[in-house]
Image (cartoon, rainbow, N blue to C red):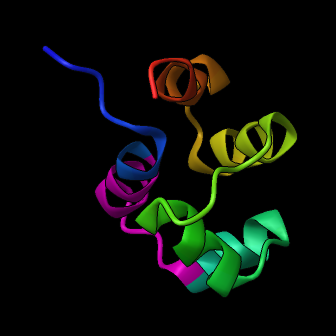
């Protein structure tokens, strides 16, 4: 099975937790436009941002970092 790319993982994790972009934005202090860019794959988050996002989504950062290494 192919690993999902990070932007797909981000959206899936957020939707599975029923967290809106607005809520995630408040939790992470990252603007909703930026979060949308990450989720659409238009922009790649930095490792620091991934740590912030994984914290907010309550998943191990390694789950998301795997998506970057295989991109």
Q: Where is residue 64 in the image (x, y as percent from the top left)?
A: 54, 30
Of the pair 49 and 29, the residue shown nearer to us: 49
Residue at figure coordinates x 55%, y 18% from the top left: 69
Q: Find the magenta span and give its range.
A: 10-21
In the rendered view, would you say 48 is above or below 31?
above
Main SS class of the magenta portion in the image? helix
Is residue 43 shown above or below 5?
below
- Residue found farthest to the left: 1
Does 15 lie within the magenta span? yes
Position of 30 with respect to 17 (left or right) is right
Q: Is residue 15 left or right of residue 68?
A: left
Task: Report the label total.
Answer: 0
- Magenta span includes 45: no
Q: Measuring from the top left, give residue 26's x and y in whole percent.
A: 76, 78
- The residue depicted at 60 percent of the width and 24 percent of the height is 65
Query: Which residue is depicted at the point 86% across and 39% down?
Result: 48
When the figure is inspected, residue 42 is found, relative to residue 3, above or below; the finding is below
Residue shown at the point (51%, 22%) measured from the top left: 63
Q: In which quarter of the image is residue 40?
A: bottom left
Tell whether 29 sits left or right of 14.
Answer: right
- Give the x, y percent position of residue 27: 75, 67
Location of residue 1 with respect to 49 vertically, above or below: above
């Amino acid at each position: 099975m192919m690993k999902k790319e990070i932007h797909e993982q981000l959206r899936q994790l957020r939707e599975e937790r029923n967290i809106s972009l607005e809520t995630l934005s408040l939790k992470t202090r990252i603007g909703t436009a930026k979060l949308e860019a990450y989720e659409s794959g238009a922009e790649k988050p930095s490792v620091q941002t991934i740590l912030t996002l994984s914290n907010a989504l309550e998943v191990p950062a390694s789950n998301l970092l795997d998506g970057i290494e295989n991109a």
